[in-house]
Image: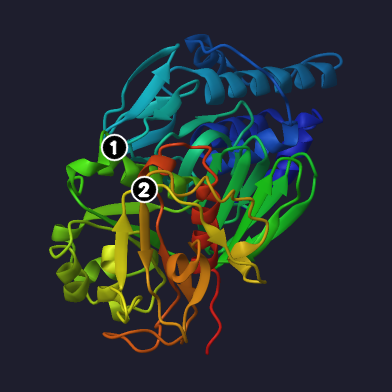
Amino acid sequence: MTPDWNDLIQRHLSGLCSPGETESLRDALRSDDRVTDLYLSHVNLDVALEGSAAGAALLEDLRVPHPLPGPWLPRIAALAACLTLGLIIWRVAVPGTSWATVLQNHDGVEIVRDGRARPATPGEGLRAGDRIRVGVRGEGTLAVSRLGRVTLGPETRLHPTREPRVLELEGGFIEIDAEKQPADQPWRIRTAQAEAAVIGTKFSLAAADARTVLRVSEGMVRLTGLSSGKAASVGGGRRAFVTGDSPPAVAGTRTGSVLLLTSRTAPHAGWDRFNRLIGDKLVGTRLWRLGFKVETRHFDETGPDDLRERALVIVSIFPDGLAEPVLERIGLAAAAMPVICLEPAGYPALGMATGGQEPPYGFSGQASDVVLQGGAHLMLRDLTVPPDGWLRTMQGWGCPVTDGAVILAHLPGRRHRAVWFAYELGAAMAPPVHLAPARRIGLFLDPHAMVDPASPVWQVFEASVDWSVSPEESP
């Protein structure tokens, strides 16, 4: 497209085009989406029209007039208005006009059309007015016209607005692998708190709990807080949060997806009605809401290749004696990526706990207060965790390496029995590793506390994730 289109559109809207030029412009509007977008940006109309096949007919029946006698400028202006009206009806509201195509539906992706929801079918086009809704366990993929590939996470609600090139993310998670966008009119993704302008990049966007989270893998995204009006340019390897009326808060982050290693069954009957799989799903949901694409794998179907291009690995495995050899087989202890281990049984295999006067880890089936350590560690900032809200029915602890670990929380009177501890890159660890190849965190979350979405222990989990994926410094 050349700058001639700008001049032609401006003269057409001013009523200065000849009949031949008007005919050329009409043909371009039908065949070239870029000209259409440019025309709409010049017109800048805000209309809300109901879909009708009459829109297409209006555009089709539009005829270039013969030379008009008398005052021709008002008539040309009227012709421009008709062309604009027909174009907007045709582009925005005519049934059959597709804004996206469903590529994949991994259970739970629905199309809401005329107030009725039904499962999305791969290959199906989405019309104006269609909305996408994803269930709590669903995932899917769309190809959005002139935007790119869009991955849908659980609990996602997405639809186009009446504005050109604007999608509204009401809630949930999307990951976008975008085509290069025109500088004067990029696609924009809007949430309740913020708006992200796409330049041509790969990024994820999550909206939940009155917060918008942006994580950029490649390229650049312009994120604007809707209440504050403040904007920030977020490049690859960076993330930004917008909470309530706050401006975007930008910081570094590791890129890649999160691998969640789990077990197929509950560890033993002593966990009452709690289903371990539900607990793992709650962890996965929290990660989606933090803007991470999550891949959940059972420990017995995981190989070394599954560790590639991961921002973080989270270990949540049972039973004792069976799952730990898998950690050794895939080489997770020596892997140069952050690891959060939620199960004390996995600490020895990862070099995170060591034996001494007592075992390297243990459990007790009773409630207990937790002593949260003071200090300036980044994970302890702004935490408001009551001592009795953490271990409600069970204790799970580990004995980390004294010279290498930072103990963040422990059982009362037993500082060596840590329920939350961390190793910085290069810190001393136990065999099979001696120096931490990346950040490591040991964290026990009582399963009954996890079931409560308002439990303060989720603050601890989110603080752990955020610190794990923050850029490391060489030791």
Q: Which callout, 1 or 2, points to the residue nearer the camera?
A: 2
How crowded pointer 2 is (Cα within 10 Å; few <14, some 14-19, many 20+) is rated as few
**In this rendering, position of residue 188 left or right of residue 78:** left
Callout 2, which amino acid?
A: Gln
Front position in the image: 354 or 223: 354
**Residue at image coords 56%, 13%:** 58
**In this rendering, position of residue 255 left or right of residue 138:** right
Callout 1, which amino acid?
A: Phe
**Residue at image coords 36%, 49%:** 394
Give SS at disc 1.
Answer: loop
Say which residue label 2 marks.
Answer: 366
Residue 268 visible? The answer is yes
Q: Residue 372's spot in the image, x, y percent?
A: 57, 61
Rendered position, 383 above or below 164: below
Dot label at residue 396: none
Front position in the image: 171 or 350: 350
Q: CA distance from mark 1 to mark 2?
A: 15 Å
Q: Residue 454's spot in the image, x, y percent?
A: 53, 37
Q: Residue 274's spot in the image, x, y percent?
A: 29, 37
Q: Residue 389's spot in the image, x, y percent?
A: 52, 45
Rendered position, 334 above or below 177: below
Dot label at residue 274: 1
